Image (tube, rainbow, N blue to C red):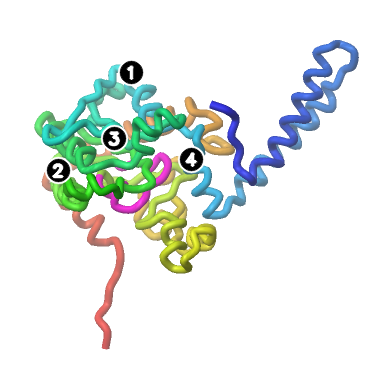
Amino acid sequence: MAEFHLDFEKPIVKLDDKIETLRSKSLTGKQDFSGEISQLREERQTLIKEIYSNLTRWQRVQLARHPRRPYSLDYITRMSPDFLELHGDRHFSDDKSLVAGIGTIDGIHITYIGQQKGKNTKENLYRNFGMSKPEGYRKALRIMKMSAKYNRPVVCLLDTPGAYPGLGAEERGQAEAIARNLLEMTVLPVPILIIVIGEGASGGALGVGIGDRLLMLENTWFSVISPEGCASILWRDAGKAEEAAEALKVTASDLKELEICDRIIEEPLGGAHRNKDEVVQSVKNIIVEELQLLSQFTTEELIDIRHKKYEHIGHWQEGS
């Protein structure tokens, strides 16, 4: 994949170009630029810390969509090299935008559900840009029920711009498929970990996003609607997505403050795409830690705690 940089990363790119130019000149042996290179590298590190410690909500949304970010299969295959993918919903077809299967982490047998985007145009067409159809949600539910039968915990990795809104999906019962998953996941008799690894948009994410613990990577977002969608509805202008992101409070820190997100997973400085092995190892360690905590509860306690978690979200009061 060609190098991709966000607008706010351009000052870093300029320093990288200067460092590379001086390094190339040094290799000729005619001049020694080691001192200048060392100074520029220090400036680069300072600049990176300054930029990434003051990101706006919209900039974090952009980072969550970065095409070089690790996707579900990047995490799953690295954490569980023995991963076996399972296919099909036994009703219509196999939705490639959602991967499901079984694997182990440190001897713990796990069922994975992951929303999968593509790394290039060809892959994105194959994966439908990470937008699941009804058969994707029905496949997920089939595999989750299988995990309950064999008493395996479920780990769901969320990364979608939303459920697929096409005519065929509506004809096959998109809303019913998502609603069925919401119902079934509230009473699934095994631990469920939900991890937002990129975008967590609308019912598309929520369709496989009900669980005991909601974890979010540092530069991810989770909301009832995308900032562009919100801006289009409120102001008839998708260009006001930055304003919408601020109003929606979509980031991990926002949702932690609202007590919706249970835990934030730190990313390498500059985002998960800058050190995939590091972020995968962090997620792996946290999965093991969280599942060990959840294993202390009986099935009845687990479901009761899950219900109370969602009952606690949001407040209402009657008018006078």
Binning the other alpha carbons within 10 Å of mark 1 as few (below 14), some (14 to 19) or many (20 upward) gives few
What residue did someone put label 2 on? 188
- Residue 181 placement (x, y as % from top left): 18, 46
| Along the viewing direction, whichever of 232 and 5 lies nearer the viewer | 232
How far apart are labels 2 and 3 at the CA level? 19 Å
Residue type for callout 1: Pro
| Residue drawn at the location 39% of the way across and 60% of the way down | 258
Q: Which residue is mark 3?
A: 98
Q: Nearer the viewer, mark 3 or mark 1?
A: 3
Residue at 29 percent of width and 61 percent of height: 313
Q: Quadrant of residue 148?
A: top left
Q: Which residue is mark 1?
A: 81
Mark 3 vs mark 4: which is more N-terminal? 3
Q: Is residue 77 above or below residue 94?
A: above
Residue, disc 4: 266
Task: Look at the image and give the residue range highlighted in magenta.
Answer: 194-207
Is disc 1 placed on a helix, strand or loop? loop
**What is the secondary structure assignment of the residue under circle 4?**
loop
Nearer the N terminus, badge 4 or badge 2? 2
Which quadrant of the figure has residue 86?
top left
Q: Please say if the residues under marks 1 and 2 sit with CB atoms less than 8 Å apart.
A: no
